[in-house]
Amino acid sequence: MTADETSAAVLDLSPDELLTTTRSVRLRLDLTRPVERPLLEACLDIAQQAPTGGNQQGWSFVIVTDAEKRRALGGLYKQSWDVYLQEIAARNSAETQAMPSRNVLRVYRSAQYLADHMGEVPVLVVPCIAGRTEGAGVGEQASHWGSILPAVWSFMLAARARGLGTCWTTLHLRHEREAADLLGIPYDDVTQAALIPVAHTIGHDFRSGPRKPLESMVHWEQW
């Protein structure tokens, strides 16, 4: 794919449309279609423009396309997902909660699908940030995460604009050291932030998601 073809692949979305239709894509990831490297590099170029604390630019992105490594990462994710489901089931039985809403059940079904197929997604991206924050204060942790989250979100927005679907996941971090060993990430010096599946989407007709009323989350002048 040439640079001109990569540019032509950008969808005709206004900034507002892009920001309000970049969804967590699970069921509609095309597991059979390879993702062209120029598309990924275009998204990464955009991600590099995100702000970081002190302009340190401490990000790293590990792009995983090797089938064996993808299967291994998918296995770590599935292990964590199974444990997570057991924890949810135990908590719900202890709290005798009401039946989850239809929307919640729909999310669980799509999350289960992703857990079952994570290792088949054409590209897995592991965004990382230099340093570790175990035992650090709130301010240091906020600065740390604030130096990687904007870059990853920029990457995900750029991917959406180019017909790619993504989903922010963190369950593999229960096995962060194993993932670090698999990918050669220096665990003591670098923190993994997420595991982002990336694939062409099945269709591009994503819409805004249901959200709570604005007044339920906005506090003017004080809480």
Image (cartoon, grey):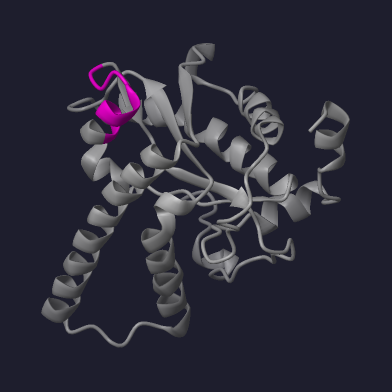
Left or right for 77, reference 213:
left
Towards the viewer: 142 or 94: 94
Residue sitting at 53 percent across and 66 percent down? 27
Residue sitting at 32 percent across and 43 percent down? 72
Region in magenta = 179-188
191 shown above or below 91: above
Q: Position of residue 198 (x, y in %)?
A: 56, 46
- The quarter of the image holding the N terminus is top right
Q: Position of residue 44 (x, y in %)?
A: 62, 28
Is residue 184 rendered magenta in the image? yes
Left or right for 208, reference 100:
right
Is residue 213 rendered magenta in the image? no
Q: Position of residue 128 (x, y in %)?
A: 41, 27
Q: Residue furthest front?
A: 68
Q: Position of residue 83 (x, y in %)?
A: 19, 60
72 shown above or below 59: below
Residue sitting at 23 percent across and 18 percent down? 188
166 shown above or below 116: above
> Residue 104 occupies which quadrant of the picture?
bottom left
Left or right for 80, reference 145:
left
Residue sitting at 47 percent across and 22 percent down? 60
Callout count: 0
- The quarter of the image holding the C terminus is bottom left
Towards the viewer: 86 or 53: 86
> Residue 85 occupies which quadrant of the picture?
bottom left
